[in-house]
Image (cartoon, grey):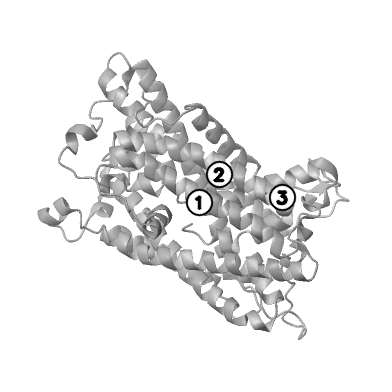
């Protein structure tokens, strides 16, 4: 829920897959995310102070994998942002139900826009076109779920993490899945997919649409705009809440990026300057109220590239905005690659617990306390799906004729558009970059993969010993207290 994907990112998948296709796509991606969440939670519950997945990859796989995986006040700020985001979601869902009720009064049922339930992707006929529309949803759905690993990243800052981190991670996954499930169903009932098609903007034509803003592709806002002037107040309020949600997403990205730079520096995989903190006192370090200020400055500096997306005119998409969209595309692929690295680390970790069970019987029993049912098959399934999404993410950019692949271009064939070539590069450039980093590190550092029979499981955190004096907070007893605890805590 930390991203704006729910508000702004559901329009194109609705066009590509149809209302039922996008629902199936998000549910399928949710199952992939579950495998990643429970896998990372199990590892960090055993080693909460190991510098997250960076330290885990170092310890149980190979230091060469680490480049792929590229304070406390944050929690207070995010609590305020959480209220705003929940307000935005509640407002949009309630207004959508109101619009559905109004449509029913004029003899238009909620399922009107579900006919047909699937779209024919790129006008490819038959079941193949419907399947490809379903597959096209995966990358956007993955983008919407990015951030579910936050509990695992901050495990070292959570009190009694070995006991609570697995439950916290599952709760985050359940909330996001329920939120997207309800929202995607409603999206398909309030607006036809044809209404979400972005308008063609022509600055030289005075009759051309004047709004090329990103939210013009939001199904929720399109529905409000179609409802008429009486809903202008709701449209303006929803835009303001969405902008605040975007600010929340930005703060979260700064937090996560700073943490990973700090972990990399501590592990010796990045310049030590990224490990500098403020205030640099023993008391502050003990209390956990330090800020890795160098990492914050670097991250904020890179995040300022987002201003490239600002348009010089209201209805003109300039070159800087296109460049920023290319950077965003590459970032999404790189993020998915970090999931691949985390899942591969878990598969190796799980294998080590089986091979070393006789030597580390006590430690592995502690690890298995937080092991989800179905492991390691959840991890293998999620790893396989993430790899397939990365490989086939840009398949539609290849030239096709009537749904058939064209493996070569004849002199009589029309040339590939320039934008198509650029999109192909931005979709697939992170893959060779990953391979270069992985094998380049191994070549320079001469690192070796850790064998399963050589893995060290000493130091597994035992909550019964490490947190014997810790008093667990009592859960709320009132109805609204329980609702708030489920949604936010």
| First along the sequence among labels 2 and 1 | 2
Q: Nearer the viewer, residue 278 or 434?
A: 278
Number of the label disc, if any, that sits on residue 20 = 3
Residue drawn at (60%, 49%) of the image: 139
Q: Is residue 33 above or below residue 102?
A: above
Relative side of 412 to 38, left or right? right
In this figure, which residue is indicated by the disc labeled 2?
30
SS of the residue at dot 2? helix
CA separation in Å, label 1 and label 3? 19 Å
Q: Nearer the viewer, residue 135 or 338?
A: 135
One can see residue 313 in this view: no
Percent position of residue 107, x then y: 80, 67
Number of the label disc, if any, that sits on residue 354 = none
Residue drawn at (76%, 86%) of the image: 206
| First along the sequence among labels 3 and 2 | 3
CA separation in Å, label 3 and label 2? 15 Å
Relative side of 121 to 482, left or right? right
- Residue with the most extreme right position: 412
CA separation in Å, label 2 and label 1? 9 Å
In this figure, which residue is indicated by the disc labeled 1?
176
Q: Nearer the viewer, residue 205 or 285?
A: 285
Relative side of 57 to 287, left or right? right
Percent position of residue 487, x then y: 43, 55
Number of callouts: 3
């Amino acid at each position: 829920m930390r991203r704006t994907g729910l508000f702004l990112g559901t329009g194109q998948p609705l066009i590509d897959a149809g209302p039922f296709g996008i629902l199936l796509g998000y549910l399928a991606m949710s199952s992939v995310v579950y495998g990643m969440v429970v896998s990372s939670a199990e590892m960090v519950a055993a080693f909460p102070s190991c510098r997250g997945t960076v330290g885990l990859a170092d310890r149980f796989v190979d230091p060469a994998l680490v480049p792929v995986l590229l304070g406390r006040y944050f929690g207070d700020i995010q609590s305020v942002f959480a209220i705003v985001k929940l307000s935005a979601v509640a407002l949009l869902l309630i207004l959508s139900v109101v619009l559905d009720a109004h449509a029913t009064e004029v003899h238009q049922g909620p399922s009107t826009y579900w006919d047909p339930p699937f779209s024919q992707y790129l006008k490819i006929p038959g079941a193949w076109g419907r399947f490809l529309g379903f597959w096209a949803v995966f990358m956007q759905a993955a983008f919407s779920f990015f951030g579910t690993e936050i509990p695992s990243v901050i495990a070292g800052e959570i009190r009694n993490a070995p006991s609570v981190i697995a439950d916290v991670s599952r709760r985050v996954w359940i909330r996001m899945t329920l939120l997207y499930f309800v929202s995607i169903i409603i999206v398909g009932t309030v607006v036809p997919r044809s209404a979400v098609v972005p308008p063609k903007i022509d600055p030289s034509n005075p009759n051309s649409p004047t709004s090329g803003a990103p939210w013009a592709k939001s199904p929720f806002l399109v529905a409000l705009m179609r409802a008429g002037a009486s809903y202008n107040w709701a449209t303006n309020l929803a835009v303001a809440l969405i902008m605040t949600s975007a600010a929340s997403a930005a703060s979260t990205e700064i937090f996560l990026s700073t943490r990973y730079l700090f972990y990399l520096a501590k592990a010796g995989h990045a310049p030590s300057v990224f490990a500098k903190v403020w205030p640099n006192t023993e008391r502050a370090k003990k209390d956990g109220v330090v800020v890795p200020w160098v990492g914050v400055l670097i991250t904020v500096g890179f995040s300022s590239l987002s201003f490239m997306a600002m348009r010089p005119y209201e209805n003109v998409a300039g070159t800087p905005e296109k460049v920023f969209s290319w950077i965003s595309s590459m970032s999404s692929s790189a993020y998915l690659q970090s999931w691949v690295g985390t899942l591969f680390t878990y598969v190796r970790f799980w294998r080590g617990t089986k091979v070393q069970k006789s030597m580390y019987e006590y430690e592995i029993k502690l690890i298995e306390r937080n092991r989800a049912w179905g492991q390691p098959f959840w991890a293998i399934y999620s790893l396989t799906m993430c790899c397939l999404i990365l490989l086939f993410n840009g398949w539609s950019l290849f030239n096709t004729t009537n749904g058939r692949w064209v493996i070569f271009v004849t002199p009589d064939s029309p040339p590939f558009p320039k934008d198509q070539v650029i999109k192909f590069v931005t979709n697939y450039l992170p893959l060779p970059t990953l391979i270069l980093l992985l094998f380049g590190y191994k070549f320079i550092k001469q690192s070796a993969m850790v064998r399963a029979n050589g893995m060290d499981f000493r130091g597994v955190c035992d909550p019964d010993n490490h947190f014997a004096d810790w008093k667990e907070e009592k859960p709320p007893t009132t109805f609204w207290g329980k609702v708030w605890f489920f949604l936010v805590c």
